[in-house]
Image (spheres, rainbow, N blue to C red):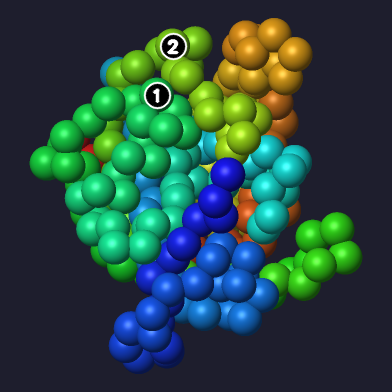
Amino acid sequence: MAEELFDIYDEQLRPLGTATRAETHAQGYWHRTFHCWLTRREENRRFVRFQLRQASKDTNPGCFDITAAGHFAAGETLREAMRELEEELGVSASFEQLIPLGQIREDAHGEVNGKPFIDREVSDVFALVCEVPLTELKLQPEEVAGVYEADLDELIAMFEGSLSEVSAIGVELDAQSGQLSRVSRLVQANQFVPRDYSFYANVLQALHGCT
């Protein structure tokens, strides 16, 4: 299978051409990504969902992360990039249903299996109010190992430092059968993709306004 191609940019987001995924992360080229947090309300509580990245991922394997996120393919528009929702989670939505939460820049460095990476992303961040039951999600096996749901205020408190862990319920993909199994987990902030905790606290606070 041909390796993914990304449009790449300099620090001022001036186009530089295209590069493969491996080249982009090896050379630290700026590129664009789509982020979407799934949320729902139940009576007076709001919940948010987050995914577990597959252990085979080339960046931040086995970490909790945004509900659905992915890179723009070369030539792709923001509207087209929302395909990640359906690809990763099996969730269908129109672009007009997405609630824009702004744009962020991330400059991350790390190492996976002895191979260093530089991940420089400009991400358009959205929320989607989603009532699809966890058990009806269709997880992309190459990308997503599980999806979990936790109380929004508890997650915010965890990232702000007043809670050490949060209880979450979820579903995980069985690699052999491809079936989802229900699970419950105690989740800690240091199990998420390494970012400043204020990144998570701020975007989760913004979910309170989603209707």
Q: Residues under labels 2 and 1: Cα distance?
A: 8 Å
Which residue corresponds to mark 2? 136
* Label 1, residues with CA under 10 Å away: few <14, some 14-19, many ≥20: some
Q: Is residue 204 left or right of residue 146?
A: left
Q: Which amino acid type corresponds to the residue marked 2 in the rendered image?
A: Glu
Which residue corresponds to mark 1? 90
Residue at screen point 68% across, 48% down: 57
Q: Nearer the viewer, residue 94 or 63?
A: 94
Q: Which residue sits furthest front?
A: 1
Quadrant of the image containing the C terminus? top left
Q: Nearer the viewer, residue 190 or 137?
A: 137
Residue at screen point 62% across, 81% down: 27
> Judging from the image, what secondary structure is the residue with disc 2 in?
helix
User: What x and y, as percent, mark residue 151?
Assistant: 48, 31
Q: Is residue 121 left or right of residue 131?
A: right
Cβ–Cβ under 8 Å for marks 2 and 1? yes
User: What x and y, as percent, mark residue 181?
Assistant: 65, 10
As drawn, the label of residue 140 is none
User: What x and y, as percent, mark residue 171?
Assistant: 59, 18
* Label 2, residues with CA under 10 Å away: few <14, some 14-19, many ≥20: few
Q: Which amino acid type corresponds to the residue marked 1 in the rendered image?
A: Gly
- N-term mark: 2 or 1: 1
> Judging from the image, what secondary structure is the residue with disc 1 in?
loop
In the displayed structure, 134 sits above or below 121; it is above
Residue at screen point 56% across, 63% down: 21
Q: Quadrant of residue 43?
A: top left
Residue at screen point 30% across, 44% down: 82
In the displayed structure, 202 sits above or below 182; it is below
Quadrant of the image containing the N terminus? top right
Q: Quadrant of residue 104?
A: bottom left
